[in-house]
Every structure is written in C-alpha cells, then in structure tokens.
Amino acid sequence: MVNHEGALDGKGLKIAIIVSRFNSVVTDRLLSGALDGLVRRGVSENDIDIYKCPGAFEIPSVAKRVIDSKKHDVVICLGAVIRGETPHFDYVAGESAKGVGQLSLAAQVPVVYGVLTTDSLEQAVDRAGGKSGNKGFDAAADAIEMVNLFKHI
Ligand code: INI
C-alpha cells in the first residue's frame, strides 16, 4: 500500500490569489487569513500575486487568465456571496462555483475555492476570522497541500 498525501510545506511555491471586492468587509479578512496561512507555511511574500476583481461572478474569468499565464503553482479564489434578500445570490454563487469548478478540472495546477456562500453577513464574518475560523487561512493550507499532492501523481 502506498499512501499519497501533500505536505504542508509552501517553501518556494508561487501563489496567485484572486479576491473579489464585493462584501469587502469579509473578503479583506479572507485575504488576510490566506496570506497568514501561506507565509506561516514558508511561502515568501515576494512569491504571492494578488488579483482583485469586482465580484464573485468575475472570479472565473480572472482565474482563467491567471492560469493561462502559467506563472503560478496554484490559484486561490476568495470571495463572499451573501444571500440577504436577493435572488441574485443564486446566480452569482452558482456561476462562480461552476466556473471555478470547470477551471479546476481543466487546469494543470490546483485551483482552490475559498468563496463563502452564506445566508447572512454575520455568518460570513464568523467564517472570515470570527468564531468559525477563517476560510482564507484554510484555503491557503488546501492550496499548499494540493500542489504537493499533485507532485506525487
Ligand atoms: N458579488 C459578490 O461577490 N457577492 C454577492 O453577494 C453579490 N450579490 O449578492 O449580488 C455579488 N454580486 C456582484 C457580482 O458578483 C458581479 O460583480 C456583478 O453582477 C457584475 O458582473
């Protein structure tokens, strides 16, 4: 039996983060969590490119171009789609997840999905450094693990 797992060692890795500005009170915190998670695992700040886009709907189109640039070992997508009162939520959340999912299957590098989809701002804040941890920090660990797992395959 051979057990394959990706190490949580980010030394030397080149990272792209795509983060949407909509609900920036949440996404700024996701970005801080992701940067903390990357640097704590050995990624150099000089090896991180941050691409900011308007909303979660735009994340896949930016991610596609970033992947095509072939400059990074992994692409991390961060955003916050909050239901509130609007049915717009379903379209934005659905298109964002579908677009990133399709890219992740086609790309040679891992693509990590750190887009929160919640019913309320409070739930989103809880998951962005509040009582339920920080999804950005988790996405950083997932990204590093996936790069190192791909090296085994
Ligand atoms: N974008 C988000 O990132 N989160 C949301 O909650 C959201 N809502 O609810 O509308 C949202 N809308 C904007 C969308 O992502 C696009 O930027 C916009 O439609 C322009 O294409």
Image: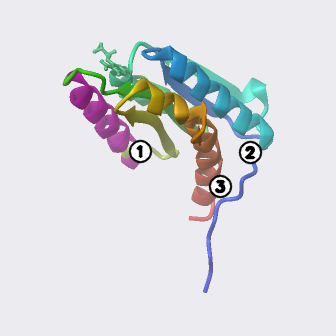
Q: Residue at 43% of width from left, 27% of height from top?
A: 80
The tag on residue 104 is 1
Label 1: which secondary element: helix
Label 2: which secondary element: loop
Where residue 74 sits in the image (x, y, percent)?
Answer: 57, 40
**Which numbered disc, 3 or 2, marks the residue that appears first in the sequence?**
2
Residue 100 part of the magenta segment: yes
Q: Which residue is mark 3?
A: 148
Ligand 1 closer than 8 Å to label 2 CB: no
Compared with residue 13, is residue 71 higher up or lower down, i.e. above or below? above
Residue type beneath disc 1: Ser
How crowded is the residue under tag 3: few (<14 C-alpha within 10 Å), some, or many (20+)? many
Where residue 134 sits in the image (x, y, percent)?
Answer: 60, 37
The residues colored magenta run 88-105
The tag on residue 10 is 2
Residue type beneath disc 2: Gly
**Which numbered disc, 2 or 1, marks the residue that appears first in the sequence?**
2
Kindly indicate the quadrant of the structure image that contains residue 99.
top left
